[in-house]
Amino acid sequence: MEPRTYTTIDLRKGMGEILDRTRIAGEAAAITRKGKALAYLVPTEWFEHYQQLAEQASAADSQNAA
């Protein structure tokens, strides 16, 4: 799914709505300035899942190096 795009001005004006869309609807958001992505806002579950995968990959790399 393509993230919904918001400018930094949109973010300043509608922070609460954007956070709710991300949290409740599970929609990712791309925050842009001058047409370039600055950051991505993702639901907590997505980020926590990413962290778990990164930790597992790091542990696997450590085991392979040993």
Image (tube, rainbow, N blue to C red):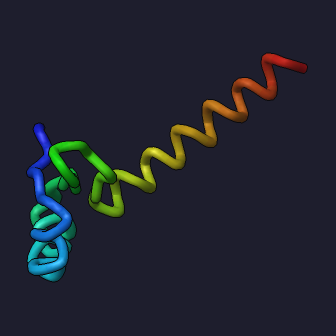
Residue 48: image location, x then y, percent:
45, 55
Q: Is residue 53 left or right of residue 2?
A: right
Question: Nearest the camera: 5 or 50?
Answer: 5
Question: Nearest the camera: 11 or 44?
Answer: 11
Quarter of the image where the C terminus is located: top right
Residue at image coords 32%, 51%: 38
Residue at image coords 12%, 58%: 6
Q: Is residue 56 left or right of residue 28?
A: right
Q: Is residue 59 left or right of residue 23?
A: right
Residue 37: image location, x then y, percent:
26, 45
Quarter of the image where the N terminus is located: top left
Residue at image coords 21%, 69%: 23
Residue 21: image location, x then y, percent:
11, 68
Residue at far right of view: 66
Residue at image coords 29%, 52%: 40
Residue 42: image location, x then y, percent:
28, 56
- Number of on-image labels: 0
Q: Is residue 22 left or right of residue 48?
A: left
Vertical comparison of 31 with 55: above or below: below
